[in-house]
Image: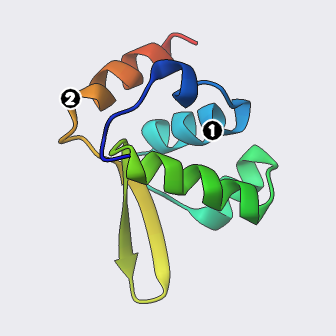
């Protein structure tokens, strides 16, 4: 996908929106917390995380075996998404 996303695709899934909103609100979060707070299963959360990483919206940081997900603030679209999600 290389950072090119369509708004319709990004917001086409409630689960993806929940995940994105949590990541932007928290700044950093791991997959276990995402699963607990969204109520989605591991496979679904992983799929949405991959989509968001491929789109350049979030980034994955590894600390040994732990993976932390956080907004990719270098991408200017993330600031717009933050503002939009804050008003939902």
Q: Where residue 86 appears, x then y in whole percent?
A: 48, 18
Against 3, is 62 above or below?
A: below
Position of the C terminus by quadrant:
top right
Looking at the rendering, which quadrant does residue 68 occupy?
Answer: bottom left
Looking at the rendering, which quadrant does residue 77 occupy?
Answer: top left
Q: Residues within 10 Å of mark 2 (few under 14, many from 20)?
A: few
Q: Which residue is mark 2?
A: 76
Foreground pick, 4 / 26: 4
Q: Where residue 49 appears, x then y in whole percent?
A: 54, 54
Against 41, is 10 above or below?
A: above
Q: Where residue 51 appears, x then y in whole percent?
A: 51, 49
Q: Residue at x 40, y 52 (%)?
A: 54
Against 63, is 12 above or below?
A: above
**Left or right side of 4 for 69:** right
What label does residue 16 carry, if any?
A: 1
If you read the primary sequence from the N terminus, does the residue marked by circle 1 or circle 2 appear first? 1
């Amino acid at each position: 996908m290389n950072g090119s996303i369509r708004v319709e695709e990004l917001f086409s899934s409630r689960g993806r929106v929940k995940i994105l909103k949590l990541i932007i609100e928290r700044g950093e979060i791991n997959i276990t917390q995402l699963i607990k707070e969204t109520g989605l299963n591991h496979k679904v959360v992983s799929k949405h995380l991959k989509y968001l990483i491929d789109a350049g919206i979030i980034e994955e940081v590894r600390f040994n075996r732990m993976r932390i997900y956080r907004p990719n603030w270098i991408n200017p679209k993330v600031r717009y998404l933050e503002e939009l999600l804050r008003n939902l």
